Image (cartoon, grey):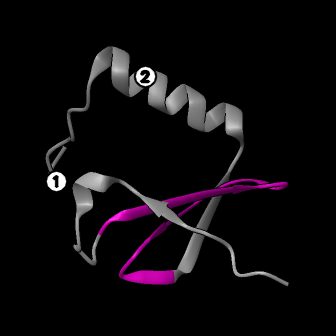
């Protein structure tokens, strides 16, 4: 059995706290490189909608007290 290949953005450089992603038969897997044991699985459709929404509307994080 081969080890899954995780990808991260080239903008992350050698940083150890970035989002990594890979796809398999169950969907798209996401994890933070500094906590690789925690993996989120999403459908390809939901990730596609997220990326499209971010490209269309940008990203504006809420304040902590909102």
Mark 2, secondary structure of its residue: helix
Q: Quadrant of the N terminus?
A: bottom right
The picture places residue 58, in percent across and down from the top left corner, at: 26, 24
- What secondary structure prevails in the magenta region? strand
Q: Residue at x 16, y 53 (%)?
A: 64
Residue closest to the far top: 56
Q: Residue at x 61, y 58 (%)?
A: 22
Where does label 1 land, which residue?
64
Quarter of the image where one finds residue 56: top left
Mark 1, secondary structure of its residue: loop
Q: Residue at x 23, y 53 (%)?
A: 11
Quarter of the image where one finds residue 14: bottom left
**Label 1 crowd bin: few (<14), some (14–19), many (20+), radius 10 Å:** few
**Label 2 crowd bin: few (<14), some (14–19), many (20+), radius 10 Å:** few
Q: Quadrant of the C terminus?
A: top left
Depth check, mark 1 against mark 2: the one in front is 2
Where does label 2 land, which residue?
53
Which span of residues is magenta-colored? 18-36
Q: Is residue 66 left or right of residue 35?
A: left
Q: CA distance from mark 1 to mark 2?
A: 22 Å
Query: With respect to residue 9, does 49 lie above or below?
Result: above
The picture places residue 20, in percent across and down from the top left corner, at: 46, 63
Asked if the stretch drawn in magenta spans residue 29, the answer is yes
Please tell me which of labels 1 and 2 falls first in the chain: 2
The picture places residue 50, in percent across and down from the top left corner, at: 49, 32
Query: With respect to residue 54, does 41 lie above or below?
Result: below
Q: Is residue 12 left or right of residue 56?
A: left
Quarter of the image where one finds residue 41: bottom right
The picture places residue 30, in percent across and down from the top left corner, at: 54, 60
């Amino acid at each position: 059995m081969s080890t899954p290949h995780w990808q991260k953005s080239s903008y992350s450089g050698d940083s150890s706290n970035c989002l990594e992603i890979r796809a398999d038969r169950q969907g798209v897997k996401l994890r933070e490189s500094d906590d690789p044991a925690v993996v989120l699985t999403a459908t390809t459709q939901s990730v596609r909608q997220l990326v499209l929404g971010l490209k269309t509307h940008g990203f504006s994080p809420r304040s902590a007290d909102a």
